Amino acid sequence: MKQNIIILTEGHSNTHTAKTACSVIRYRTEDVVAVLDSTQAGRTTQDLLEVGGEIPVVACLDDAPTANTLMIGIAPPGGKIPESWRVVILDALRRGMDVISGLHDFLSNNADFNAAATASGAMITDVRKNSEATIARRVGLNEDCLRIHTVGHDCSIGKMVTSIEITNGLKAKGQDAKFIATGQTGIMVSGDGLPLDCVVADFVSGSAEKLILENQQHDYLVIEGQGSLVHPSYSGVTLSLLHGCLPHGLVLCYEIGREKVTGIEHMQIPALAKIKEMNEMMASIVHPCPVIAISINSSKVSAEEAEEHRERLRQEFGLPVCDIFRHGTDELVDAVLALKKTK
Amino acid sequence: MKQNIIILTEGHSNTHTAKTACSVIRYRTEDVVAVLDSTQAGRTTQDLLEVGGEIPVVACLDDAPTANTLMIGIAPPGGKIPESWRVVILDALRRGMDVISGLHDFLSNNADFNAAATASGAMITDVRKNSEATIARRVGLNEDCLRIHTVGHDCSIGKMVTSIEITNGLKAKGQDAKFIATGQTGIMVSGDGLPLDCVVADFVSGSAEKLILENQQHDYLVIEGQGSLVHPSYSGVTLSLLHGCLPHGLVLCYEIGREKVTGIEHMQIPALAKIKEMNEMMASIVHPCPVIAISINSSKVSAEEAEEHRERLRQEFGLPVCDIFRHGTDELVDAVLALKKTK
């Protein structure tokens, strides 16, 4: 049955906290029938989240009668579910709607939710739930498959979107490329992948390696990055993923104006040159793995400021620099194709 | 009731694979009544594992009648239990012996073990089992408490032992110091700590931070390191811990002659200077965190070779260098005291 999704973002409908909602709307537009946020009802998702055109924001489940699936549309730090959402989730399950969640706080661990799902025949999918137990071995990697990995100077700056857009750009040029999802939103968008930040710590790099081994029949893999090497809360996931997927080239994602570490506002993010140096050092232990391009997120500044900033970064790093939404992905895709030629 | 421990190392009684056994024998000598390895029965643990004096190695549980606790004494990659051990564990549980395990493969998930434990009143303790769900926040750290952290060029090279010995050395000089265990063996030895490699990836640095926040009434914390920044299987745990405990100084642990990454034998370990550079770079994002001393493990070479190597490292790095078993801990402890004076 086709999923008709209503995305719950109640009280958190901004592009940062509701990044899961934004990406699902962007990449599965045809599956999304509404966003549920009673504080914003009557608006469109385009107006509220800068994506989705005329998809309506509604106040309750009754206002989206065609919906058969409720998706949790936020990714709060720590992955806890807002208390007030429990009643909406329970209501959806009682109506027989499937519920999809990417939170660390598994819905399927809740007895009330399970009872409601069993009674109505609804299905609960916790995207982050897993029992991965693979150690990275660095055996069997196909070096004919070019591995590109997105890294960033902070979390939630556009690594997933950059990865998807590079993949789509490669495909548009006739290349055999695949996007590798490593987080809950990427999995919801692409339909496969592994939620690396919810794997037991010893097995994160092994899980990343497994994703490579299972997909390296493609000529290009574009592997979604997680967190940042300088974000104290998530840097371990970042490094496990970097070492597990063993990339040949990095695309450095950067939001103009982002100066403080998300969630740790007293901590300054180091300069981009330092971020680049750290990533290249940690990525280049067994073979050289350079940053080949910079993907800027310029959504908070004017087109003129974005252009100035872009030019400054080009001068500083001598690399292709672009905002995929303002400038398209050609420069990034060309950098990937150029790297492939050197192999 | 006092624990009288028999340690199971069946078929794996070497100082590397049985490192859990070795450390428990070293630091809880009075609690260990025997080691169980039928392939080595009749020998002493001193002879077999270079520690423990006259503690006997026995062939079966009947040969250690005073034992009331069976401890799993190995830490294999991936933490899986050897199949042949299940019968011994079941036998112990049926006799009413408590069983303590540090494996990823939880004994308490096994229905047969649980049934046997319930019937006999025995207790199963899975040291790695946890439900940690704390994100690192970098709030509330006491900068009057000096945080020293051991890091290394590979896993299983002596970071835990170095941490314990520095702590004991500080205490011997009248200082208020505490060892912070971050892995299963450290927890078995010290009685507290958290098994960071078995925490859900997003929460590893938060768990490390929690250990600091709960113990920073001491003047010194010496935090056990895990893995290595260049070990692809475990580097994420290493970095989460490094960023979670936010040390003021590092002690770099190094085994003379270790050239290949443990478990990934086709991978060369980078030069020690590179390891030092990486660790200092990743540790120094918010404040300078230098390597203040090098702890060498010279167990595989002669005293003369150890001395030559020690002198070479002193020349190269201009730092105190010693093997705690050959040279004592004075140089390491003095380096910690000197760092404290600069704060």
Image (cartoon, coloured by chain):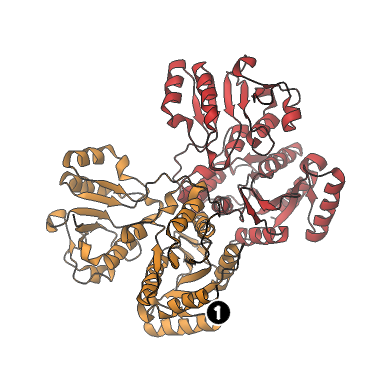
Chain colours: A red, B orange
Quadrant where the C terminus of chain A sits is bottom right
Q: Position of residue B216 (x, y in %)?
A: 45, 61
Q: Chain of mark 1?
A: B
State the residue in front, B99 or B83: B99
**Residue that appears at 79% across and 51% down:** A321
How many marks the image carries: the answer is 1
Q: Position of residue B311 (x, y in %)?
A: 48, 84
Give the amino acid type for the residue marked by disc 1 in the picture.
Answer: Phe
Q: Is residue A21 visible?
A: yes
**Residue that appears at 55% across and 82% down:** B318
Q: Is residue A252 left or right of residue A198?
A: right
Q: Name the residue that disc number 1 marks.
A: B317
Picture layout, residue A136 above or below residue A215 = below
Q: Is residue A153 visible?
A: no
Picture layout, residue B138 above or below residue B143 = above
Q: Is residue A139 left or right of residue A288?
A: left
Q: Position of residue A123 (x, y in %)?
A: 49, 23
Quadrant where the N terminus of chain A sits is top right
